[in-house]
Amino acid sequence: MTAQIFVTLKKTVLDPQGQTIQRALNSMGHPEVASVRQGKYFEIELTGVDKATAEATMAKLAEDVLSNPVIEEFRIEITG
């Protein structure tokens, strides 16, 4: 089973790195790119747990270790 965890800044938090990427893409000839929000991606292989346990464990791990809940939010996908 694989857990995919996507961590991004909350919509209310400024994303200066995303803005820099957006400006760079515009200057490279991509004026259609209106905004960019960047984040982190984690792929975690799991064994010996059912899907419900995996979801609960990964949510706890994402909240406690992989993200800063003050400024970031996360989304989890479990496959396999």
Image (cartoon, rainbow, N blue to C red):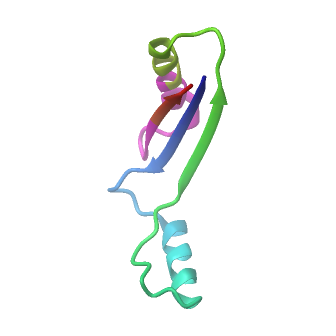
Q: Position of residue 61 (x, y in %)?
A: 55, 25
Q: Position of residue 5 (x, y in %)?
A: 53, 37
Q: Quadrant of residue 69?
A: top left
Residue 16, above or below 50: below
Q: Quadrant of the N terminus?
A: top right
Residue 64, above or below 40: above
Q: Quadrant of the C terminus?
A: top right
Write the residue at 52% across / 24% down. 58
Q: Position of residue 37 (x, y in %)?
A: 46, 62
64 falls in the magenta region = yes
- In terms of depth relative to the viewer, which is nearer, 14 or 78? 78
12 falls in the magenta region = no
Residue 19, above or below 3: below
Write the residue at 52% across / 31% down. 62
Which span is picked out in magenta? Answer: 59-75
- In terms of depth relative to the viewer, which is nearer, 10 or 44? 44
Residue 58, above or below 17: above
- In terms of depth relative to the viewer, which is nearer, 38 or 55? 55
Q: Residue furthest front?
A: 80
- In terms of depth relative to the viewer, which is nearer, 79 or 62? 79
Q: Position of residue 11 (x, y in %)?
A: 34, 55
Write the residue at 57% across / 35% down. 66
Write the residue at 42% across / 47% down. 71
